[in-house]
Amino acid sequence: MSAIRRIELPPEASLHRYRQNGSYTDCYHMDVPRIVSFKEYVATFYTTPLFKVERYILALLASRPSSDAGALELASGTSSNFAVWSVEDRKPDQLLLRDFLGRTRSWLMAAPLGARATRLYFGSAVVPLSRSSEGAASFGFAFHAFHGFHHFYTKALMSAARSRLAATSSERR
């Protein structure tokens, strides 16, 4: 299995619109040694045990419960809402979600690497709270306080998805 690496956004990423407007953006990727459909990646990502903890916390704090069935509907394109997110942009190979407060975006993309592997991406955007008269972005205390945790948690979420995808691959053999 490949490492989870932080990289620049690929040129075709829906998340680019936020990078271009001065929002904070990041992008991570991992390579999986099998073909993973975009639908499978999204469904797997949002149904890992780790992400279920996040869903539980969001249900308590934001009164926005979610389920595995809802994650599957999001992945298949039959729903445009999931927990605290709504679909801002959907393409056959990527999904851009907006949180209900409008401050953050989550982005997933899957790209084939030849006939036997898939590159899976996950990225985020944070919209500035305000801008100075010179245009400098201000993100606020919480952004800076949790920035390090965000990077750790992103890698943990991707690792959890990779583990589930590997287990699913083993079950198919």
Image (cartoon, rainbow, N blue to C red):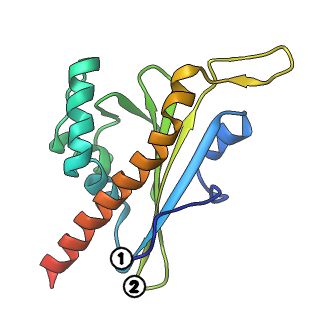
Q: Position of residue 36 (x, y in %)?
A: 34, 70
Q: What's the residue at 45%, 70% (across, down)?
A: 3
Q: Amino acid at mark 1?
A: Ile
Would residue 21 be found to the left or right of residue 58 on screen? Answer: right
Q: Quadrant of residue 158?
A: bottom left
Q: Amino acid at mark 2?
A: Arg
Disc 1 designates what residue? 35
Extreme residue in the top direction? 133
Whether label 1 touches label 2, CB < 8 Å: yes
Would residue 8 be found to the left or right of residue 48 on screen? Answer: right
Q: Nearer the viewer, residue 155 or 96?
A: 155
Graded by Cα atoms within 10 Å as few (under 14), some (14 to 19) or many (20 or more), the crowding at tag 1 reads some
Disc 2 designates what residue? 116
Would residue 129 be found to the left or right of residue 46 on screen? Answer: right
Classify 143 as above or below 109.
Answer: above
Q: What's the residue at 81%, 22% (across, down)?
A: 135
Q: What's the residue at 25%, 23% (across, down)?
A: 64
Q: What's the residue at 27%, 53% (across, down)?
A: 43
Q: Nearer the viewer, residue 16 or 167?
A: 167
Q: Position of residue 99 (x, y in %)?
A: 43, 28
Extreme residue in the right direction? 134
Mark 1 and mark 2 lie on one chain; the one further toward the N terminus is: 1
Q: Position of residue 133 (x, y in %)?
A: 84, 14
Q: Is residue 46 visible?
A: yes
Graded by Cα atoms within 10 Å as few (under 14), some (14 to 19) or many (20 or more), the crowding at tag 2 reads few
Quarter of the figure with the C terminus: bottom left
Would residue 10 be found to the left or right of residue 153 on screen? Answer: right
User: How many numbered marks, from 0 up?
Assistant: 2
Q: Position of residue 163 (x, y in %)?
A: 26, 66
Q: Secondary structure at mark 2?
A: loop
Q: Quadrant of residue 171?
A: bottom left
